[in-house]
Amino acid sequence: MRDKTKQLVYAALLTALAIIIPIQFGFLKVYIPPFSATLAAHVPMFIGILISPMVAVVVGIGSTLGFLLAGMPMPVVFRAATHILVGFIGAKFIEKNISYGKMSFITAIIHGGAEALVVIPFIGLDIFQLLIVTGVGGAIHHLVDSGLAYGIVNVMAKGRKKTIYTIFKSEEEKVENKEPIR
């Protein structure tokens, strides 16, 4: 029961960050319609991925809400909604002991593709806008934020003499988990 409570607290804190980042960090935004990138917008999602699929999904919902409350155009809000899917898939990879690096690379492709798909109703089938601006741009933004999140979690883990895979786990969960596949 204690682990569920910890996960709920982590989900709440990361969701709050996911909501605040697009609202308060607009000065870190690059906007080339339909693409936009707010530096660090994916960091709560990546931290949630390391905790559990449920936490990652809740944070993805919070991210979507944050972009909506920030008054972003609907294509951007829909792109933020892809964090729900990407977070869930990424957390499942981590559960299957896939390394953070491999998970980040695979989910970057999924994330870029999903973002390109959700903007079709808004921009049509302009291949350059879909694949290059939105898809590749989204994947690059994903990888940059993946690196930021890794750095943050790695510093936290070293401070607690743990790994990025065990920092959010209880002693019982650490015994069950194996070392990630590299």
Image (cartoon, rainbow, N blue to C red):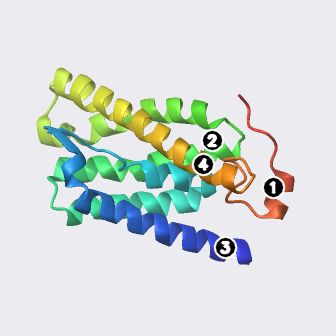
Q: Position of residue 80 (x, y in %)?
A: 31, 51
Which residue carries the number 1 mark? 174
The reply, left or right, for residue 84 in relation to residue 38 is right
Question: Badge 1: how crowded within 10 Å, few (<14), some, or many (20+)?
Answer: some
Q: Which amino acid does label 3 sit on?
A: Lys
Tell me what residue is drawn at x 71 percent, y 47 percent: 163
Q: Which of marks 2 and 3 is nearer the N terminus?
A: 3
Question: Badge 3: how crowded within 10 Å, few (<14), some, or many (20+)?
Answer: few
Which image quarter: residue 110? top left
Q: What residue type is labelled 4?
A: Val
Which residue carries the number 2 mark? 93
Query: Would you say the residues marked 4 and 3 are in contact, meaning their CB atoms lie under 8 Å apart?
Result: no
Q: Earlier in the sequence, mark 4 or mark 3?
A: 3
Distance from disc 1 to disc 3, alpha carbons, whole Å, reads 15 Å
> Which label was assigned to residue 4?
3
Distance from disc 4 to disc 3, alpha carbons, whole Å, reads 24 Å
> Which label was assigned to residue 155?
4
Quadrant of the image containing the C terminus: top right
Query: Would you say the residues marked 1 and 4 are in contact, meaning their CB atoms lie under 8 Å apart?
Result: no
